[in-house]
Image (cartoon, rainbow, N blue to C red):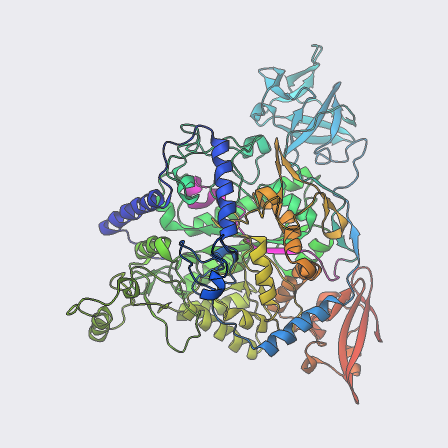
Amino acid sequence: MTPTPRPVQRTVISVLAAAGLVGAGMLGAAPGGAPSADLPSTYDAQARERAEAAAERTPHEHPGTVGVVDALGPATDVGHGHVHNDPTTKNAVSRSGEAAAAPDPTTARQRSASRGRVAAQRTQREPRLRGVPLRTPRRTVPESRYAMAGGCYRLAGHELTFQATGLGTYLLYAPDRTFLAASGAGTTWAAAPSPDADWTVREVGLGRFTFTLADGRALRRTTSPRGLATGAAQPFSLRRAGGCTAFPEVGTDVSGRPFGGVTSFQEVRGWVDPHVHGQTHEFLGGRVICSPPFHKYGAPAALVDCPDHQVADGRGALLEDVLADRAPGTGHDPVGWPTFSYWPNPHSLTHQQVYYKWLERSWRAGLRIHTSLLTENHILCTIYPLKKNSCDDRDAVRLQARDMRAMQDYIDAQYGGPGRGWYRIVTDPFQARRVINQGKLAVVMGMETSVPLGCNVQLGRPTCTEEQMLTELDEMRRMGVSQMELTNKFDNAFTGVAGDAGSTGTLTNSANFLSTGSFLRMQTCPSTYAPGTEDRLQSPNLGELGDPPQGAPDQDAIFGAIWKLFGDVGVQPAPLYPAGPHCNQLGLSPLGEKLLSAMIDRRILFDPDHMSVAGRNAALDYLEQQQAAGRPVGVLSSHSWSTPDAYPRIYRLGGFVAPYAGDSTGFVEKWRQHLGWTDRRFYFGFGFGSDMNGFGAQGDPRGADAADPVTYPFTGLGGVTIARQRSGERVFDINTDGVAHYGMYADWVEDAEHVAGADGPALAADLSRGAEAYLQTWERAWGLAPDSCRNPGLRMSVRAFTRAAAPHLGTRALMRRLGQPWQRLGREFTYCAREPGRKRVLMTVELSRSGKVTAVRRR
């Protein structure tokens, strides 16, 4: 594939863009005076300001202005610089601010019928769930080299906590909080973990193990008072003991067993987050997100600030300051573990928020599907001066995929060995269903990059061939990618991008030029488009500048003349745009259509978020055509980066939608709006797209004095009890801290149910049904027909149905013949058939414990 050329002028523009980024941060931040030396107080003050700003974004009246808002209309500035009831982008149904006010694309009658169908689905029988042990019971003598993880055992007269650093490797942690370590030919009790304290354990007989370091030194007995030295390996017996000290680690503060199903193939329950960035500590060269999501030496080693943040007591964190709308150099308390006085918080975007123990808390509370997106932005990576990794999108996603596998192994190590952990990477919906019914978290590997598969566009020409694209796609599929967006921030060989608005949009547009050789090709949207069906408004544009001076050339005319003379070379000549609304002229390319076809063949879920309106419309048109032709399709919108006109179409395709989570108040309104867009032919459940670790601001706290706040402890899915989350010395409360880290999504769901008021139980039901809805969308992408009860045209005769449900047939083969069941309760699948005089006959297929057909009966 042709590499992206980098001529001298692009280097100059990159410097200007970088300067613009810092300049915009300086101009956008409050100038103030010298930064306060009391950084925790500074953060507290900023948190209060954000809470006040959040209050300003909700409908309200200022003293002395009673009735002004009503008199002026629903979206009027009453003279103090903002509109009271205009929601922020993160709480809008679309993250395009221009599209947020779009008219609903459905009729009142359609919306009413849709809400009624969803309400009826909530009344159906619930699947039976069971509590699942967190790990296998611990034996007196460990049964394998993995089984002692997290346990207390006696070794040569010492009671030690075996803290797993990997599969079969351990720190040996003493009651006085020291570590058994090698020192020359002897041993010592070290104050901190190191390679000299990281022991590989091997089993040499029942209950007998050797302990060896990476350099070959091994534990052996000695007559010294410590009783241990190093040299040739000798076996040691291990027995469970008491009196150990727990290794320092983040808590989950959830009690009770996780829930699973009574069979591996039944209907599932659980929350879905299809848009998380779990490995972005490797993103943008690996020096932007400060901490990894796990470290073999635990939270004290993982949850530390970036080296540049630690300069001058946190005042070296220029990017963090700009992203948090502060003047560069304001600074923050750089100490993470154990105090966490500044980070994590909802607006600190350069610090790790998806540490594995925080993720574990949300899993234990009810999360059951989690899509971790592999991501990169090669332009920002190139501009950012600190890096340790390649800026090539393909290198980045490979590295992040390896990290996901390493994280799975690490969590396995904490829970007793390969396959024992709760974090399970899945590659098909059938595997995901088994994992969820085991009570574990199904982790889907997704991809969101600006130049996927190495296919950029340069001066209107793709930099890859179809053959190269397919080779790259096959590699991604083998790697485990099952969900994919076609773009993120820039135009590419597959599609145009929606772009960004405001000052961010200006910088993104400059970066698009660096990436493609062209600024975004935005023009005024066609008059046939409904209001709100538009891409992000670009600046500068003639609508902002007013009418051009008399005698000044009309840019559109000049552009049109060049177009006529030289043809469409795919280049926007200058970033001065006509008045809005704006639509990117670059839509779905022929190569993009071929990619969609290849994704259908490889059963990869397609996410149209971030595409231009033209690109997304063409993509949905194509999927509708392919579905009508009998090809299976799978589509979802994962975080509100589509326009509202797309959501009913996605539902009609049997797709799944998870709006951007944002604040709990805004999310509840998005849920209510989506209830009117569902399709009667498909099962409905709802999700949320957190976009955490993806530079997406998280939900703010409603405040301790808000109406109906969350009270602790509360009950999560499956009856677990959830207390305030403790990380080291810091205790988090959703009412005052908001979604500071991923573990707080357990609390955020509870808060959203409180915000919903009388609708809280309905919201809880729809979120708990999200995992099943996602799996059913994914199953249809794998070729399963939708259920015959909601789709009368798919009903077989009773006789044909009975023949098709042959004895000993497995569940997957059964569904290939009969389609998706209407209900999957325990060991029974329910379908609909027909017979003369009866259009709907309920049929039950009875299954064995292993999922084989044993009988068919009418109901």
Q: Position of residue 60 (x, y in %)?
A: 52, 56
Could you tell whether 229 is left or right of 547 in the image? right
Q: Where is residue 757 in the image (x, y as percent from the top left)?
A: 67, 58
Q: Does the magenta stretch include residue 276?
A: yes
Q: Where is residue 176 in the image (x, y as percent from the top left)?
A: 67, 19
Residue at 29% x, 44% y: name it. Answer: 19
Could you tell whether 786 is left or right of 93 in the image? right
The reply to whether residue 555 is visible in this rendering is yes
Q: Position of residue 202 (x, y in %)?
A: 69, 31
Residue stretch in magenta? 264-289
Q: Quadrant of the C terminus?
A: bottom right
Along the viewing direction, whichever of 173 and 510 lies nearer the viewer: 510
Along the viewing direction, whichever of 290 and 622 lies nearer the viewer: 290
The residue furthest front is 64
Along the viewing direction, whichever of 62 and 265 lies nearer the viewer: 62
Kindly indicate the quadrant of the structure image that contains residue 271: bottom right
Q: Is residue 805 magenta?
A: no
The reply to whether residue 73 is visible in this rendering is no
